[in-house]
Image: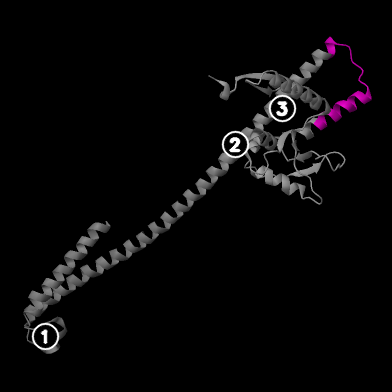
């Protein structure tokens, strides 16, 4: 054992030091081992010299034995270090394999869920289609009707990714994208925009601006914050609304006309548009008693 070997080496060193001090140095009346010489050895009788010689041989033998043990222990220590390094590398490799395995399992689960959902949807669609076909006569849809439906869907998708800006001052050679971007910064939004004026230029009329973004989510975020422009030092007269179809614009125009009529009829109440109706918000704060 490494601990017992260290203790034995310590005891041997103490024994050698004691033997040198009390049996050799004092017996020969010298100050140290370095001052010991052949002349002083000759003063010893054979019996004393023989005993010291045997003692020295035994000590040297024990020392040699401990040195051999030390060598073996050193080799074992190096082997243990190598095994420790190998074990650490195996742990690292296992951790890497575990991460890769978890990734593969997650991808497999996602693929399975996706396939299952797609299969279920397809099966339900087929079932629904079969029921409809069995219940109703096959309709004849005109080519122009199909074309109109497709155009409507495409236009709705385009409008969902855009909004309108009104009362934005119009200038010659204006950098319209930058002007719109400056307005959106006041709403803490920095999307990439594509802006263009709508309609023919007229010196006495400010044309509306159509703005297109990359996603409908970004449009929803901006529309939700648009009312903040009312308190803007620079753009309080500018307002933002969703991009409506001609039919939706006409419906909104009628709603605005109704809102104006109701406000003029009763100035003590607060009226506002929500969805497709004009709502009564109750008495204004400055009229409550």
224, 130: nearer the viewer: 224
Q: Is residue 236 left or right of residue 30?
A: right
Mark seen at residue 214: none
Mark seen at residue 118: 3
Dividing the picture into quadrants, the one containing residue 160 is top right
Residue that lies at the very extreme toward the top in this rendered image: 135
Chief SS of the magenta region: helix
Mark seen at residue 41: 1
Q: Position of residue 267 (x, y in %)?
A: 65, 21
Q: Residue at x 27, y 68 (%)?
A: 67
175, 141: nearer the viewer: 175
Dividing the picture into quadrants, the one containing residue 162 is top right
Asked if the stretch drawn in magenta spans residue 191, the answer is no
Residue that lies at the very extreme toward the bottom in this rendered image: 39
Q: Is residue 243 left or right of residue 144?
A: left
Which of labels 2 and 1 is toward the front?
A: 2
Q: Position of residue 118 (x, y in %)?
A: 71, 27
């Amino acid at each position: 054992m490494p601990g017992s070997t260290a203790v034995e080496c310590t005891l041997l060193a103490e024994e050698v030091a004691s033997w040198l001090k009390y049996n050799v140095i004092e017996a020969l009346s010298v100050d140290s081992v370095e001052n010991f010489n052949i002349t002083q050895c000759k003063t010893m009788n054979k019996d004393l010299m023989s005993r010291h010689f045997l003692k020295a041989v035994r000590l040297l033998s024990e020392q040699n034995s401990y040195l051999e043990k030390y060598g073996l222990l050193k080799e074992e220590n190096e082997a243990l270090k190598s095994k420790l390094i190998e074990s650490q590398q195996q742990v690292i490799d296992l951790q890497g394999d575990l991460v890769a395995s978890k990734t593969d399992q997650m991808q497999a689960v996602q693929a399975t869920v996706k396939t299952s959902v797609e299969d279920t949807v397809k099966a339900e669609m087929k079932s629904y289609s079969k029921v409809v076909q069995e219940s109703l006569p096959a309709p004849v849809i005109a080519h122009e009707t199909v074309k109109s439906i497709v155009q409507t869907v495409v236009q709705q998708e385009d409008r969902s990714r855009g909004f309108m800006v009104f009362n934005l001052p119009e200038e010659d050679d204006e950098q319209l994208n930058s002007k719109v971007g400056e307005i959106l910064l006041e709403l803490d939004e920095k999307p990439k925009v594509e802006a263009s004026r709508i309609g023919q230029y007229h010196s006495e009329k400010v044309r509306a601006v159509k703005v297109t973004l990359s996603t409908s989510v970004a449009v929803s975020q901006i529309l939700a914050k648009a009312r903040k422009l009312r308190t803007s030092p620079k753009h309080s007269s500018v307002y933002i609304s969703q991009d409506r179809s001609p039919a939706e614009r006409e419906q909104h125009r009628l709603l605005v006309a109704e809102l104006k009529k109701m406000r003029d009829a009763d100035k003590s109440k607060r009226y506002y548009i929500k969805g497709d109706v004009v709502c009564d918000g109750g008495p204004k704060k400055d009229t409550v008693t």
